Amino acid sequence: MPPGDGEQLLSYPIPSDTALGPPAEWARLRQRCPVAKVALPSGDEAALLTRYDDVKQVLSDPRFTRLLSADDAARVSDSESGGVFNSSMAQSLPQGGEGHQRWRRMVAKWFTAKRMNALRPGIEAMAERLIDDMLAHGHPADLKAHLAFPLPVWVICDLLGVPDSDRDRFAHWSDTLLNLTRYRQDAVDTAQAEFADYMAAHVAAKRTGPGEDLLSELITATDPGGHRMSDAELVATGQALLVAGHETTANMIGKMMAMLLADRSHWERLLADRSLVRTAVEEALRFDANPGFGMPRYIGEDTEVADTALPRGTTVVCSMAAANRDETAFEGAGELTLDRSPNPHLAFGVGAHSCLGQALARTELQAVLEVLLRRLPALELAVPVAELRRLEGLAVGGLCDLPVRW
């Protein structure tokens, strides 16, 4: 049951004892307390959902909105601004209704599966070059630093027409946007102002000298009603795609490889049967117990979830990762099953706000896995699994590094 008056709230995010394993609390919450009161890093209170059906219901229900700027919405991070979900960048883009759908339709043309497949040869070629550099460096090597981080940065920079030589700055700016407890407010404000100025200058440059990239097209694109994006929308779109397009995928590459190498029988099976790459990527996405914060939603009217009343003004946190471990939705949910099919996981969300870049993420994950299987069949972890370290203090989950040898 949810805690009563005077009972201590569960702190969220819930820590885990290991870098790859789920918090033990998830199973108890799914079983006994599917709508749990939790304290966010800001100290504000929210309702946490951990069951598959409940998470899917809320993410699909347009009454649960992304309007985390509402006066009575919970702030996520312990900074004054409340973090990425409450930020001015997030609120510069339409968060719901027809405005959001119009923005999404204009951007989504660039993220179709067909267009992503066309990018795949270039992604594989870049992965090959990065692996060449890692081999020249010698082992042990940090797979995150050599491959998992630079590859998605290169891909998203190419899509946006920005130089990937600025990638260290992008990493710092996106870390501050994704801050939960890592940065003080003055550092967040400085970095976010720098990021906005950088992207505004980039949009202005694209106006005078357009290229073959997404932002150049969006500057002149109109929807069927003749609407064009404002400069504020273009800047926020560039920022959002740069952050989402590299940070989550970079971390997922590292976590996927850690999962497959933690029990090397998984890696051996993939070496023996490359046809499993696609389903293995989907299973790694489902099995990921370290995805970060989850998806917050705000409800502006009284409602009910899992027979629990939620008064208007409640902020709900959907834990897709906990839902993806729900035994009522996935047989053997606690096992990594490389050929699992079907696999209706919620790693990319669901409904009107599902991840816009999921076809790109899938393409990158599959390409990286294919190239590593081909180039480094002897790949293994260079440290015991117990020594892998989680990223802390950010809204995304990942590993600090991934030491490997071959």
Image (cartoon, rainbow, N blue to C red):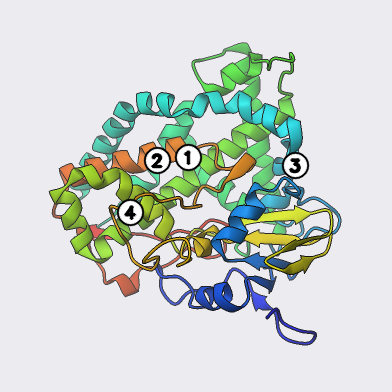
Amino acid type of the residue that numbered disc 4 sits on in the rendered structure: Arg
Look at mark 4 in the image and give the residue it sits on. Answer: 340
| Left or right of 353, for residue 267 | left
Amino acid type of the residue that numbered disc 3 sits on in the rendered structure: Gln
Look at mark 1 in the image and give the residue it sits on. Answer: 358
Amino acid type of the residue that numbered disc 1 sits on in the rendered structure: Gln
Camera-side mark, 2 or 3: 2
Q: Helix, strand or loop at disc 1?
A: helix
Question: Percent from the top left, x then y, of residue 358?
Answer: 48, 40
Residue in view at x 26 percent, y 69 percent? 383
Q: Which mark is residue 362?
A: 2
Camera-side mark, 4 or 3: 4
Amino acid type of the residue that numbered disc 2 sits on in the rendered structure: Arg
| Left or right of 399, for residue 107 | right
Residue in view at x 43 percent, y 40 percent? 361
Residue in view at x 31 percent, y 50 percent? 280
Question: Percent from the top left, x then y, of residue 267?
Answer: 20, 56
